[in-house]
Amino acid sequence: SPPQIDMDNHKDLQKGRKMAGNNNDEEKSLLTVDVSKDDKSQKTEKSEKVSAKATETGIYMAVFFFGMVFHEIAIEAASKRFSELEALAAALTLFQFGSCFLLPMAISRGKALETFPRTLKALLPYVGLSILVFCATGLATQSLRYVSYPTKIVFKSAKLIPTMIVSSILRTESKYNASDYFAALLLSAGAAGYSFGTEGTEGSNNSAFGIAMLVISILCDALVPNIQKRIMSKGLSAAGLMVNTNAVGFSVLLFAMSVSGMLADTVEAAIERPELLIYLIGVGMCMGMAVLAYTRLIKSSGPVVAVATATLRKIVTVLLSYIIFPKPLLPIHAFSSLLVFVGILVNTYCRKR
């Protein structure tokens, strides 16, 4: 009968709705499970990225830290064992130039050489820059004949002072506040205090000459970033700048050493005492790896982490210098080291802000 058919249709409709509702519930349940899985996978992926970045940063910090420590200790050891070799500072700088050129070239598979200047006019800025780099590096190494190694480290740590002077003379955009001047005052006092009672491989009679070399060295250190900034403002990358500068520096220094006879003296000394070649290669390789790691460290973690690592490296280097190569530590040296350390911390804090 018609009423019975309606009742059957009604039951079928309710049954269909119930089944549809169950299907919707299952779909919602599956959707919730999928969303939960997506959230977990995203969290896992994020955690893995953070862990990978931390590992990468740790590797760069370790390579830079140990590379520079071995580099500095090897330079002091070479300065003591080959104190009679006048060309030692130039030879060490030559191998540093070479390593800092070859390592980026090898990593980039030659692509870093694409930006190398093709004309004499384009080459001249790199000649000037390489001369400044040589003075900053070579004079600091040569000063070890007249001052102690910790004195060199302390003076090189006081770069803020000439940087502020050069910035004021060139009228760059850099502005300094009271904290910067306070840090400069601490660094000045520390460097001055450490110059008392210092002694190099030739005794303490010529310590004033060694300190003069260090002053010129850190002045060149202050000029280098300004020249680099001017060159990079034309669109050159940091890697390209590094390759071009070190390629030119290596070529110019190799020519100068060949003409002056220093290259022949170095080769003769290496033949008589092959360990010299080990020192030269070791210093160059450590420097090249440390520079690359420092550049990557700044890119991955920022300048504050890089500066903090560099500061810790200097402290450890000075301590190792006193342990491996015993030398008198006067009370004024300990106090001056504290002043320099506090000055570096103040300067680092200002950069972070």
Image (spheres, rainbow, N blue to C red):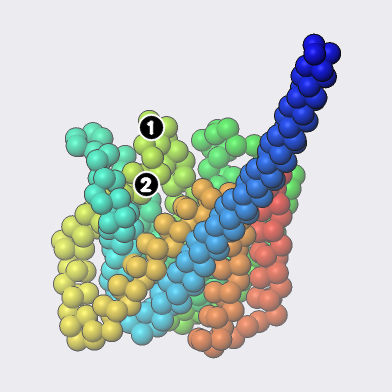
Q: Can residue 158 be seen in this view?
A: no
Residue 2: give x, y in percent of width and height: 80, 11
Residue 30: give x, y in percent of width and height: 68, 41
Residue located beneath label 1 in the image = 235
Residue located beneath label 2 in the image = 239
Q: How many marks?
A: 2
Looking at this view, name the residue that lies furthest to the front.
1
Question: At x 47% / y 45%, what residue is drawn?
Answer: 225
Residue type for callout 1: Gly
Residue 61: give x, y in percent of width and height: 53, 63
Q: In this view, does 280 lie above or below 353?
A: below
Residue 203: give x, y in percent of width and height: 46, 82
Q: Is mark 1 on a helix, strand or loop?
A: loop
Question: At x 34% / y 74%, what residue is drawn?
Answer: 282
Q: Is mark 2 on a helix, strand or loop?
A: helix
Q: In this view, does 215 lie above or below 26?
A: below
Question: At x 43% / y 71%, what residue is drawn?
Answer: 71
Q: In this view, does 3 lie above or below 219?
A: above
The answer for how far apart the CA atoms under marks 1 and 2 are is 12 Å
Q: Which of 234 and 293 is in front in this view?
A: 293
Q: Residues within 10 Å of mark 1 (few under 14, many from 20)?
A: few
Looking at this view, name the residue that lies furthest to the top.
2
Q: In this view, does 30 lie to the left or right of 153?
A: right
Q: Residues within 10 Å of mark 2 (few under 14, many from 20)?
A: some
Q: In this view, does 352 lie to the left or right of 282?
A: right
Q: Is residue 223 above or below residue 144?
A: above
Quadrant location of the N terminus? Answer: top right
